[in-house]
Every structure is written in structure tokens, then in C-alpha cells.
Amino acid sequence: MTTTEKKIGTAANFVDERLGAAKWVKKSLNKVFPDHWTFMFGEVCMYSFIILLLSGTFLTFWFDPSQKEVVYNGSYEPLQGLKMSAAYASTLNISFEVRGGLLMRQIHHWAANIFMAAIVAHLLRVFFTGAFRKPREFNWILGILLLTLGLVEGLLGYSLPDDLLSGTGLRITSAIIQAIPVVGTYAAFFLFGGEFPGTDFIPRIFTLHILIIPGIFLAVITIHVMLVWYQKHTQFPGVGRTEKNVVGHPILPVYMAKAGGFFFVVFGITAFISAVASINPIWLYGPYTPGQISAGSQPDWYMGWLDGLVRMAPPLETHAFGHTISWNILIPAVIVPGIIFTGMALYPFIESWITGDKREHHLLDRPRNVPNRTALGVMSITFVMISLINGGNDIIATNFDLSINQIMWFSRIGIFILPPLAFIITKRLCLSLQRADRELLLHGAETGRLLRLPHGEFVEVHAPISPEKAYLLQSHEQLVPLEIEDVDARGVRRPGAIKNKLQRRLSKAHAVSVPKVTEQELKEIENH
Amino acid sequence: MSNELTPIDDSALPQHAPRATDVSPASEKRAEQQVAILFGLSGVGSLLLIYSYIFVKDTVFIFIPIMGNQNAQQLGIGIGMAMSLFFIGIAAIHWAKTLMPDKEIVNHRHEFRSSDEDRAELVQTVKEGVAGVQLGRRKLIKRSLGAAIGLFALPPVLLLRDLGPLPGKKLETTNWKVGTRLLTDPGNRPILASDLEVGAVVQVLPAVADMEHRPLSDIAKDPVLLIRLRPEEFQLDAERLAMTHEGIIAFSKICSHMGCAVALYEQTTKHLLCPCHQSTFDVTRAAKVIFGPAARPLPQLDITVDAEGYLVARAPFNEAVGPSFWERNSQ
């Protein structure tokens, strides 16, 4: 035994005699994590969250969350002598006086964007591969919660510098709160400490932004990751991979080295982007005053789709009995997002109701093999993309010399027509891909080599595919529609006929798929 | 199911294909050196960061194609930090991929559902525990507990009451009173009707006691846009026309949709456009909404001139300015 081993042994003995951790740690170090590049999205989320904690802490050392009026006398000449809030002045100070301060601000903002982008990518991966199915519904809901928290945290974060752009964002936020029937005006007055903008809001959202929400984030992320650990990661289908096992590299040493290294890579890339690419140059916007605005006011992209929805809303208000209900705000900013997020959170249960599938799933779906779900996902992406395009309609109009009104009308009509169209096209594409898989399995891969047969016919030579590939192509389950009878065995109508009908129809639509290759078919081909 | 293919035998699981570093000592040596070089590059990055922090002045700018002029200090610190982090990561990954064992292993999964015995025991334990509480029997305790918890929920809500004042009529009032002078913003100068030429647009604020320290919450309600047109360009009813003065018309600058400043005026079309959500208002028709999500025209301020010929408000706004709210009487 070397001296190092002895030292480590003594330390380990000390810990184990007190915690009895040896058994658990031994098991944990041999824990398997399957490999796939799409599994890194979730890692990027976690790493950029750590980057946000580190860079954010740095920023709090100089940031003054106060709306007290000060006169700027820092080193940025264009704003010298101007009245502004202490929050804005201290943000300028971080950008121009603190060495590396601007870099940290940019790292914080870029990391927030990367965080949100990685959450979206992770969400799409989990959705399209069916990783949310039983037993992982809890974790799916926690994920939706994290996404929602991220939207709020991002909005609060870029509002803190109190510049003209973010102030405009807060003006819109206050209008949304004010639009809520009955309690809206009171809620807005309580949040802002009186009339907009008041002097209380920045210190209040500062506490939320740096303490409460990160605390909730930490707790939820911890549970999220612990559940992945406890339930074991899903894996893509392939030879040797079943519902009963998990194949991959053990934590020690390979996964630990790769994942640990990946954290540094994510941090390094974020730092590089932040070193060379400016983001949120608040000194160009000037301090916030409600009487002014900059043209092309844009929120960050993850809020941009909501702004796009608000822009395309019809000019509808109800005026009755001395009260006003702003449908033009409530529908796009409260009702539609509410439906979308609730629908997302409930989706695992909705799909399980449609398919009647209550089994555990640990093998991931290839998106083409579940056409209905994939089409639904692409439909949702299309919806958000049209909203996002409309959220940037002014930028698009000026850059491409188009009319804002035309883009707006394109979005207003497109938001109803294009998502369903995307659904239909995606479903057809999935079925075509299934057919292509079937062809591949039955006839092998096309080689592009043409043969002329003795009697003059031309045929293309097909090469057999590898057994691994063949296994993958037939490893999925054939989707089958639920059989629900309207009448029971004795011919009596069962209760809930409309519900049954709906479930039957949805189930039938969900189960549309190309028949899998059967053993007989394969034999016939072989004998051919 | 019989119509499905039997899975391919598990033993066909692809065996560990040896890497170059597994078979060739030269290759292994090279990989080791590569990892060391990558760690070395990280060190170079850290040194670059330290050098830039201490020795590069923050007044030095260097030109980089595409990116333009960049502050040398920020760039040096940033690139140094990026290198020092990135290369540690790449080195670790390269190490793992080329030199650490490459064999995949298999863990087994177990169903999460607990055994029936465990479930039954749990139910029994819970039942016994709940029975021990005796809530069903002790009605007095049950009711007083309910009342206590109900009352207990009120103080936390009450304690938040002082977050802000009650709205009252604040959203419906501005600093525009009968006879309030219109002052230029910025400048706080009173305006003669003759100061404005046809086609001119001026932002004005009401004259108040302390013009140097207007609270932002006033600036969120008070701004007004003055626009002078040729009188024949107006398409207004008599009532609205009477609120103008010699072709000068005044509208609240605060958007009736979500309260942004309606800052863009198009001379040729006489349209006001809000940059936030593109609500468009026609100045010639009393700021009627002709496009976008706003549901109400911008409130019009009734203006005239005082004895000295300066523009003043003849009356306060006759409706609330800014975005809608539940208590707003929009009739």
C-alpha cells in the first residue's frame, strides 16, 4: 500500500465509521449513464445555471438595487450629468469602472440566454423521444416549472439595470397585471408600491431575482436531478438495450471526467462569446423615463413570442357597467400562455389516456414511430415561431423593407393556419420515414448501382443492412388503437359515451402507423 | 406477439472495439502529451487574464475585423478566462475519451411499484397513526383546529398590505388642470400658438410647482403630444374640433394599449405609431385606432390660449390616460 492510499484509506474510514457511506458510494460510482449527444442539453442547463450563480454573485458586489435619483459622473461621457436611478448608474459603473465587470455582465446575460435555449432544447428532446412517459411524469412537470421560472427570472433580471429598454418592458408587465379583472389594479399598486413606476419595484424584484427564485431553482433542480439518478436515465433503443437495463459508461471515471470537463467547456464557450459579442449595451439606451422610448424595443427571445402574441391580438375590449376588460391583453398575455403551459404540464397524462398505455417506459421512441406526438410537437414549435416572428415584426420590416402591417396580417392569419398545416405535414413525413424504414428492412439499402439483366431490364442493387441497424428498425412497438365499446357485454349503453367516443377517435388518430415487418414477410423475401 | 420479429440475440452487442491508444504505445504516449498541452493552454489563458487585468489600460481599444473596436482590457480578460476554462474541459474530455477505460457496462432496472406487502403495511401504519390522532372522535379539537388554521392564514396576507397604497382615483387623474400651461419637454418653456408651424410635433408636460423634480409616476401619465395641422386636414366632429386651437391638436402620449410612449409620428400619413406593439392612431380622426392591438383612441386634451397667448389646457383629460384597468369607466 502506498502512502497516498494509506492517507485516503484513513480519511475514508473516518467518514464511513460515521456515515456508513461505503455501500452507497460504491454502488453510485458504478452507476451507468447512457451516452447520446442529445442528453447533453440537460447538462448545459445545469452548467449554465451554475455560471449564472457565479457571475450573478460577482455582479451583486457592485450593483445598487435602488431607484433613488442620482446624477451620473462616471467615465462614460455621453451620459455625464444626466439624472438617473442608482441602479442604472451602478450598472454603468460595473460596465466601465470595474475591471472585468462588463465581461461578467455579458457572461451573466449570455448564460441566461444559453440557459433558456438549453431548457427548450432539453424539453424538445424529452418530448419528441417520449422520455416523459411513466414513471417520469413528475420530472416532466418539474421541468415545465423550471421553464416557467426561467422566463420570470429572465424578465426580472434584464429589468434590474433600469435602462430605457427594460423600463419599457416593465411598463408592459405592469399593464398586463393591471389588465387582470377585479384585482389587477390593486395587484399592480401593491407590486410597484403605488403608481407605475414608483421607486420600490427595482429593490423588490432584486430580492426575488437573487434570493427567492434562485432558491426555488436550486431546490427544484436538485429534485429534478435526484429523480433522474433514482429512476435511472432513459436510453435510446439498440442492440442489448431493453426496458429492464441501462447500458453506458460508469460514473467513475469516464462519465465524471466527461461531464466535469463539459462544465468547463460550457463555461469557456460562454466566456468566449461574452468576450467578443456585446449583449444588452445598456449605456446606449439611456436611463428609463416613461415619456420616452427607443424604436425597435425588443424583449429577450424567450419572451419575444409572448410579445408577438400581444402584438397580433385583435383590438378588443369590453366596456360594461363602468368596468373595462382588456381582451387584447388578457388573451395573448394570460389566457393563451396559461393554456399552453397547463397543456404541456398535463401532456404525459393526456397521452397515456389516449393510448391507454399505463406501463413503465425506459427505452426512448424514435420520433417517426409516434407520428401524432411528433406532429403535435412540430405544431407547437410552429405556433411559437410565428409568434416570435411577429414579436420582431418591426425589426424584420426595417431590415427587409417590408410593411409592418403585412407581417402582422401574415401572423394573424398564419397563427391559425400554419400550425395545423405543420401537424399534417409532419405526420405524413413520419409515416413516410416509417415506410422508408420498412423498405430498408425488407429490401436493404439502395446502393445506386444499376444492373442490366440479360433480358434488358434494369434493376438497382440493394445491399443488406447490418444486424444492428435491422434490430433498431424493428425494435419499436406497433401502435394499436384502443378498443372501447359504447355498450357493455349485455348491450347496455355505458356511461360517458361522449368521453369514450373522444378517446376512441384520438386513440385511432394516435395509432396511425405503417405496419411493422413481420417474420413471414422477411422469410418470403429471403426465399425470393 | 407472433407477427413481430424476434429480437436479435443480445450477444450480438457490439464488443469493445480497441482504440488506437489501446493497442499502440506510441499513440498512447501522443494522447498523453496532447492532454498535457491542452492543460498547458489553460494555464496560458489564466496568465493572459492576469496580465490583462493588471497591465492593460481600459482606455486602449483594438480593432478586430467584423467586431469593430474592442476594449483591449475587457477582451484580454475575456479571452484569457475563456481559454483557461475551455482547455481544462477539453483536456479532461480528451483524457477520458482516449486513455480512460472505454468499456460500457450494464445496470439493471427494477419496477418502482412497491411490493403488495409493503403497501399493505404502509396502509396499516397510516390507519393506526390517524386513528391515534382521534380527529374523528374529538369534534371540539377538530373545529377549533380548523378555526385556528383559518385565522392563521389571514395575518401573512394582511402583513403584505403596506406594499403599496390603494389605487383610489390615481389612475384617472393627471397634473392637467383647468388653465395648466403646456411646457416644452425638455426645456419647460411655455408655448405660443405661433411657435408651432404646420407639421410641427412637440412633446409637452404640464406646468407644476417643482418642474425640476417631476416624479417618474407623473411622467408616466402627463406627457402630451402637440401636433399642428392645417385646419382643413381634420376630420373631427364639432365637439372634438372645439378642443383644438388653430389647427393644434393635443393627445396623450401614453399608449391606450399598454402604456408605452407613442413616439413615432409619420408626417405624410399623419399617423402616430407606438413602437411597442405597433398600434397606429390617425391624428386627423381624433387618434382613432386604425391598426394594431389598441382598443381605444389616445385621449385628447382640450386646449386653448391664456391671456398672454400661451397654450393652456382648457380642461383636464375627460378620461383616464394609459392602459386599461378593471375600474376604468370607458363608456
Image (tube, rainbow, N blue to C red):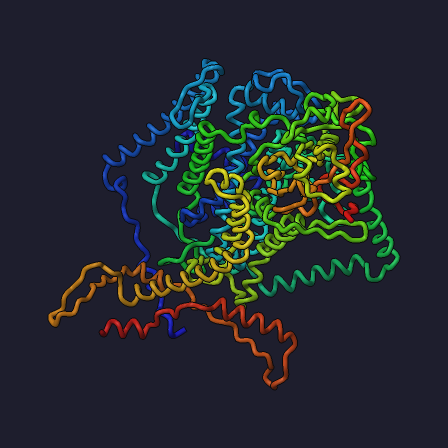
Residue at 34% of width from left, 63% of height from top? Answer: A437
Q: Is residue A200 visible?
A: no
The residue that appears at 62% across and 29% down in the rendered structure is A163
Q: Nearer the viewer, residue A270 or A410?
A: A410
B137 or A153: nearer the eye? A153
Nearest to the observer: residue A99 or residue A86: A86
Quarter of the picture holding the N terminus of chain B: bottom left
Outermost residue to the right: B140
**Relative vertical location of residue B207 with respect to residue A10 in this rendering, above or below:** above
Is the residue A391 above or below the residue B7 in the image?
above
Q: Position of residue B296 (x, y in %)?
A: 70, 46
- At 14% from the left and 66% from the top, the residue drawn is A452
Q: How far across and how far down the image is residue A277, in percent?
A: 46, 30
Left or right: residue B63 versus residue A179 is left
Name the foreground residue: A194 vs A257: A194
x and y, in percent, of residue A79 in the image: 60, 20
Q: Is residue A214 above or below residue A244?
A: above
- For the view shown, which residue lies furthest in the left direction? A454
